[in-house]
Image (cartoon, rainbow, N blue to C red):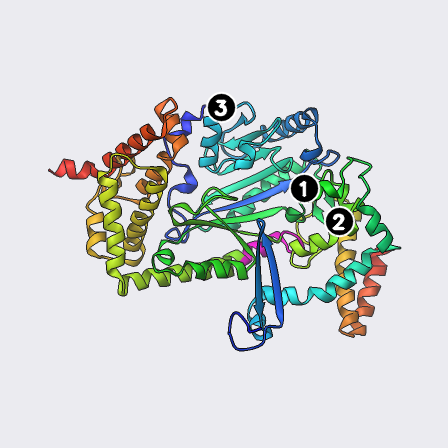
């Protein structure tokens, strides 16, 4: 398949975007992808996706992933079947309760990102702020390990340990 | 405060001023928030919705925004009023025609509105004329901080502000910019804009938001990613990359019209003038379509010094008395006034009763004719 932008190189990057129910596909080459911020971003998450998925799955993910489909949130009674129908969740706790099923969706909707970085509530406790910092540091740590930058990884690990104490 | 107090004038952010005003009509930032300890609205009973409504109303109404604020019970408002609020971009269609107890808090000058019980418990928005996203954010962030002193929002360290739909998760920020792109359309290059928007992961919407058509060559672009990127980074992408790129495309198309396709440009402007000056029945859709061409002519003169036969003639027209400046000539403010005040709900609210479509078309044509022809009458 040829790149849709330059019409020269082979398309090696395939993007699917679903906005407002409309599905659009794009097939481009690495060179054109490098020129477009979005393509570069959507190209990284394949690794990011795997590692962050692994990071949040504590045990028996296959089993619980399946069982989530049948569960109802103890707080609001919401089920994933309802989500498929309405596109909205039942209560804030659903993000935690159905995390395994929702995470891939969240990742898709936000260009592979799964961690908040932005405003914190002014009343957020020190714990919350630390928690966010640790989450961000862990992501950096994963990247450092992947790129075999063990010196940086060690530094990041020490930082995390320091905050966690 | 009655809606008729604002319905006979345009709102401040639609007065044609602000940075890059020849192409960027307005900037808007919206924040989605939910109160901690409550379910999302799809799972709330009407009693719980009323509780949320009261809680937020009590927090919002005493806020010091430097302007008077008023409240409207959307679920109890007449249909015409709801249409009116949508036409003025003060509430969404979803909010206007949703279910259950809900309302909106509006600043008198219409730069701020807070929809309560839309898709999320609270949707704040700030609007400004032209390209002013940073200013919008500064203001909305201050308002958000004031509200956060009084109420706890659902927030998770990992996912940020928790929203009913995962697509708003994180910052809950939706940045929208309304753009006027008539030259790209006229020169058959509007796909350039759609492709650029797609490449930059933007959603493109029509004049009145989700699911509406692009009337009057006006398009709204907005971010889709709200998680894993800070509010300031989203805004700087718009200000430094997205808006300059699209503005450049439109400007190139305007230059192309001026240098190589004057006939097309003059034909569109002259036809628009002739129809608007003479029609006795005109639909809202047609009026919006034609006013877009007058807007283009005026802006090309004002910002590019364009002077073609049609543009010169356009400039002999007078504006509505309210807008006449020193020169008394047709201004963008006149175009905007005709644009907004002839929308169906505006027409009817100002007329004082509901009208069928033929009567609306007649009234609309009359208002436009008298605004554009008065100078000619005075001269003759």
Determine the residue positioned at 57% across, 75% down: A31
Determine the residue positioned at 80% across, 69% down: A153
Determine the residue positioned at 65% across, 40% down: B33
The residue beneath circle 2 is B157
Q: In which quarter of the image is the C terminus of chain A?
A: bottom right
The residue beneath circle 3 is B78
Disc 1/disc 2 C-alpha distance (Å): 28 Å
- Read off the magenta span: B226-237
Residue placed furthest toward the left: B380
Residue A133: x percent and y percent?
76, 56
The residue beneath circle 1 is A85
Graded by Cα atoms within 10 Å as few (under 14), some (14 to 19) or many (20 or more), the crowding at tag 3 reads: few
Q: Do the residues labelled 1 and 3 touch (CB within 8 Å)?
A: no
Would you place residue B248 above or below residue B323 in this image?
below
Disc 1/disc 3 C-alpha distance (Å): 30 Å
Graded by Cα atoms within 10 Å as few (under 14), some (14 to 19) or many (20 or more), the crowding at tag 1 reads: few
Labels 1 and 3 in the same subunit: no
Give the foreground label among 1 and 3. Answer: 1
Residue at disc 2, secondary structure: loop
Residue B263: x percent and y percent?
23, 59
Q: In which quarter of the image is the N terminus of chain A?
A: bottom right
Graded by Cα atoms within 10 Å as few (under 14), some (14 to 19) or many (20 or more), the crowding at tag 2 reads: many
Give the foreground label among 2 and 3. Answer: 3
Labels 2 and 3 in the same subunit: yes
Give the foreground label among 1 and 2. Answer: 1
Total marks placed: 3
Q: Are marks 1 and 2 in contact (CB under 8 Å)?
A: no
Residue B274: x percent and y percent?
22, 44
């Amino acid at each position: 398949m040829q790149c849709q932008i330059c019409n020269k190189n082979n398309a090696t990057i395939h993007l699917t975007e679903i906005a407002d129910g409309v599905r659009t596909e794009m097939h481009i080459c690495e060179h054109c992808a490098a020129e477009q911020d979005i393509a570069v971003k959507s190209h990284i998450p394949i690794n990011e996706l795997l590692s962050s998925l692994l990071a949040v799955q504590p045990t028996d993910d296959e089993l619980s992933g399946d069982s989530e489909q049948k569960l109802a949130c103890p707080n609001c009674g919401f089920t994933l079947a309802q989500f498929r129908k309405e596109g909205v969740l039942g209560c804030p706790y659903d993000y935690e309760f159905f995390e395994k099923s929702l995470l891939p969706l969240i990742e898709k909707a936000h260009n592979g990102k799964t961690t908040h970085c932005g405003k914190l509530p002014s009343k957020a406790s020190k714990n919350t702020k630390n928690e966010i910092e640790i989450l961000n540091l862990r992501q950096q740590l994963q990247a450092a390990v992947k790129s075999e930058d063990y010196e940086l990884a060690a530094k990041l690990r020490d930082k995390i340990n320091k905050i966690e104490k | 405060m009655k809606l008729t107090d604002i319905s006979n004038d345009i709102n401040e952010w639609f007065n044609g001023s602000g940075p890059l005003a020849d192409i960027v009509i307005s900037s808007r930032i919206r924040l989605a928030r939910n109160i901690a300890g409550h379910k999302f609205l799809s799972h709330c009973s009407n009693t719980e919705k009323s509780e949320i409504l009261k809680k937020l109303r009590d927090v919002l109404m005493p806020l010091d925004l430097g302007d008077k604020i008023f409240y409207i019970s959307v679920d109890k408002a007449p249909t015409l009023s709801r249409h009116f609020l949508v036409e003025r971009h003060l509430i969404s269609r979803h909010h206007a025609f949703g279910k259950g107890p809900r309302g909106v808090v509006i600043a008198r000058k219409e730069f701020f509105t807070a929809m309560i019980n839309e898709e999320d418990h609270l949707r704040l928005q700030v609007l400004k004329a032209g390209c002013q996203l940073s200013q919008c954010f500064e203001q909305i962030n201050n308002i958000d901080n004031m509200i956060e002193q009084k109420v706890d929002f659902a927030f998770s360290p990992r996912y940020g502000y928790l929203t009913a739909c995962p697509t708003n998760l994180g910052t809950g920020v939706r940045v929208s910019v309304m753009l006027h792109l008539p030259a790209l359309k006229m020169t058959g290059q509007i796909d350039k804009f759609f492709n650029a928007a797609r490449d930059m992961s933007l959603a493109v919407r029509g004049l009145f938001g989700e699911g509406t058509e692009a009337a009057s060559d006006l398009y709204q672009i907005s971010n889709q990613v709200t998680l894993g990127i800070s509010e300031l980074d989203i805004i700087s992408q718009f200000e430094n990359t997205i808006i300059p790129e699209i503005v450049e495309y439109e400007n190139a198309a305007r230059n192309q019209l001026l240098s190589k396709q004057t006939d097309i440009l003059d034909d569109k402007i002259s036809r628009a003038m002739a129809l608007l000056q003479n029609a006795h029945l005109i639909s809202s859709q047609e009026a919006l379509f034609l006013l877009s061409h007058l807007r283009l002519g005026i802006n090309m003169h004002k910002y590019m010094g364009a002077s073609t036969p049609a543009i010169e003639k356009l400039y002999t027209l007078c504006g509505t008395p309210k807008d006449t400046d020193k020169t008394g000539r047709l201004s963008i403010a006149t175009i905007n006034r005709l644009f907004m005040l002839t929308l169906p709900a505006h027409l009817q609210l100002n007329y004082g009763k509901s009208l069928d479509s033929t009567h609306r078309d007649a009234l609309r044509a009359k208002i436009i004719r008298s605004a554009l022809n008065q100078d000619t009458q005075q001269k003759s």
